[in-house]
């Protein structure tokens, strides 16, 4: 079983749609959780950290369920510029970031 | 811009050769990590350096080695290149929980 597993993509949605990405992780000792965004042939960039209480940043909402070892990302009112690959990431003890394979989102007009 | 720079941006090598990739970390960041990202995959952790000492290693063979210098810049060396080493190599610097990535070096082994 992979350490971080994400929904297989791609997700193709129209502008304005709401889309949700799911992720599970296998190591219960994981301490920090993130969503990164990666544009085609570019480096990953931090989208947001994920906290147990849930957190929101504009149109983006992230949630963490430690008991289920489950992380989610919700994007509301999708924009063309949201088209990218979204990477679920966990960190165990300040060393390696463990990345999921990524889920590709394509938003069309 | 993250302040993390990598060189070169692109590189073509022949199987069996050796390669050195370089990374200049963001000012004040004493931790550097290297990742390999194959096409269609997420980045895979190679190793991490903290204050010039290796501080963690992923599931990569010994022909992948590294260095961190007193100014916290870093090198990734790969010996005896194989075709499967073709990938985007990413360097990330951090000082705390957030990691900042460089733009990567795209290595092609032919």
Image: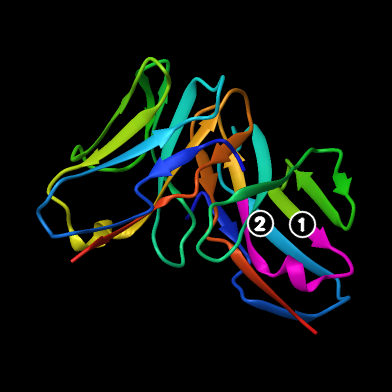
Measured in 3D between alpha carbons, the distance from the residue under mark 1 to the one under mark 2, in whole angstroms, is 9 Å
Q: Position of residue B46 (x, y in %)?
A: 36, 40
Counting residues from the start of the chain, the first of labels 1 and 2 encountered is 2
Q: Secondary structure at mark 1?
A: strand
Q: Quadrant of the C terminus of chain A?
A: bottom right
Q: Label 1 neighbourhood size at 10 Å, few (<14), some (14-19), many (20+)?
A: many
Where, by quadrant of the figure, is residue B59 drawn? top left
Does residue B9 appear in the picture of this structure? yes
Tag 1 subunit: A
Range drawn in magenta: A74-88
Q: Position of residue B102 (x, y in %)?
A: 50, 43
Viewer-closest of B108 and B55: B108
Is A28 contained in the magenta span? no
State which mark lies toward you, 1 or 2: 1
The residue tagged 2 is: A23
Q: Residue placed at 29% from the left, 60% from the top?
A: B86
The residue tagged 1 is: A73
Residue A46 falls left or right of residue A16: left
Q: Are marks 1 and 2 in contact (CB under 8 Å)?
A: yes
Viewer-closest of A51 and A24: A51
Q: Position of residue A94 (x, y in %)?
A: 55, 26
């Amino acid at each position: 079983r992979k350490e971080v597993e994400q929904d297989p993509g791609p997700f193709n949605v129209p502008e304005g749609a709401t889309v949700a990405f799911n992720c599970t992780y296998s190591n219960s000792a994981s301490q920090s959780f993130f969503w990164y965004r990666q544009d085609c042939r570019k480096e990953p960039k931090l989208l947001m950290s994920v906290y147990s209480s849930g957190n929101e940043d504009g149109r983006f909402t992230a949630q963490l369920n430690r008991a289920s070892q489950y992380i989610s990302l919700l994007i509301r009112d999708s924009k063309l510029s949201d088209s990218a690959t979204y990477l679920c990431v966990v960190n165990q003890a300040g060393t390696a970031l463990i990345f999921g394979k990524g889920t590709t989102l394509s938003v069309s007009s | 811009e993250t302040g993390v720079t990598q060189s070169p941006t692109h590189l073509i090598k022949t199987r069996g050769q050796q390669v050195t990739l370089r990374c200049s970390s963001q000012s004040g960041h004493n931790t550097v990590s290297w990742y390999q990202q194959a096409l269609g995959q997420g980045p895979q952790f190679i190793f991490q350096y903290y204050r010039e000492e290796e501080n963690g290693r992923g599931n990569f063979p010994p022909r992948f080695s590294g260095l961190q210098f007193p100014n916290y810049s870093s090198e990734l060396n790969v010996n005896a290149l194989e075709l499967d080493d073709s990938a985007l190599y990413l360097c990330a610097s951090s000082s705390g929980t957030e990691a900042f990535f460089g733009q990567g070096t795209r290595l092609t082994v032919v």
